[in-house]
Amino acid sequence: MSKSRFKERSPKPVTYLIGAAVGVFITLILMLASAAIVLLFNLDRDYCAPLGTVSLALGSFAAAYYVSKKSESRGYIIGALTGLVSFATVTVISLIVNKSGLTLNTLFHFIIIVLASAIGGILGVNRGKNKKYI
């Protein structure tokens, strides 16, 4: 039997819940900061949607980073799944509240959020000095 150089450690379910809470907290803080910037600098409301997308992407990044750091393996998978869950949650809530349907912007939001989360997962796994795992 050969030893695998990867640690196969599955995070506990509470780790996913804490990761989700971290992501929501970061997203809320960034959205509040974005709203304050738009209000204080009297910016046009057209900036609100991109700032919201960036806030969600960074919150998903933080959630994926946290969960991947705890799991120590499969960072890109955990990150991508975190992004998918974040995107699906926000899209379903948006469809219920807005009733506008899916557009090409939805695809761009999907790509941005999932990529940011996958990068967060990869960085979370590779946070150590000599680790180079994807």
Image (cartoon, rainbow, N blue to C red):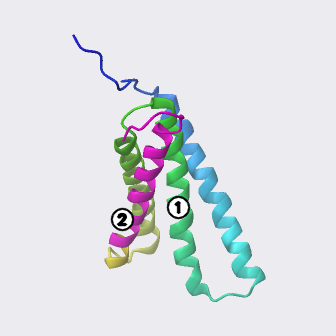
Q: Which of the labelled discs sits on residue 89, or is there none?
A: none
Question: Of all residues shown, which one is farthest toward the front?
Answer: 130
Is the residue marked by circle 1 packed among few (<14), some (14-19), or many (20+) residues within 10 Å?
A: many
Q: Nearer the viewer, mark 2 or mark 1?
A: 2
Q: Is residue 34 magenta?
A: no
Question: Of all residues shown, which one is farthest toward the right?
Answer: 40
- Counting residues from the start of the chain, the first of labels 2 and 1 encountered is 1
Q: Which of the labelled discs sits on residue 56, or is there none?
A: 1
Is residue 128 positioned above or below 102 on the image? above
Is residue 12 positioned above or below 131 on the image? above
Is residue 17 positioned above or below 48 on the image? above
For the stretch drawn in magenta, the main secondary structure is: helix
The residue nearer to you, when weighing 126 against 41, is 126
Q: Does dot 2 land on a helix, a strand or a loop?
A: helix
Would you name the residue on which mark 2 appears? 111
Q: Does dot 1 land on a helix, a strand or a loop?
A: helix
Q: Is residue 110 magenta?
A: yes
Span colored in magenta: 107-134
Under mark 1, the amino acid is Leu
Q: Position of residue 8 (x, y in %)?
A: 36, 24
What residue do we see at 49% from left, 33% from top? 130
Q: Position of residue 92 (x, y in %)?
A: 39, 61
* Quarter in which the N terminus is drawn: top left
What residue do we see at 43% from left, 61% from top? 113
> Could you say which quadrant of the image residue 18 lies in?
top right
Q: Is residue 41 left or right of residue 49?
A: right
What residue do we see at 50% from left, 52% from top? 61
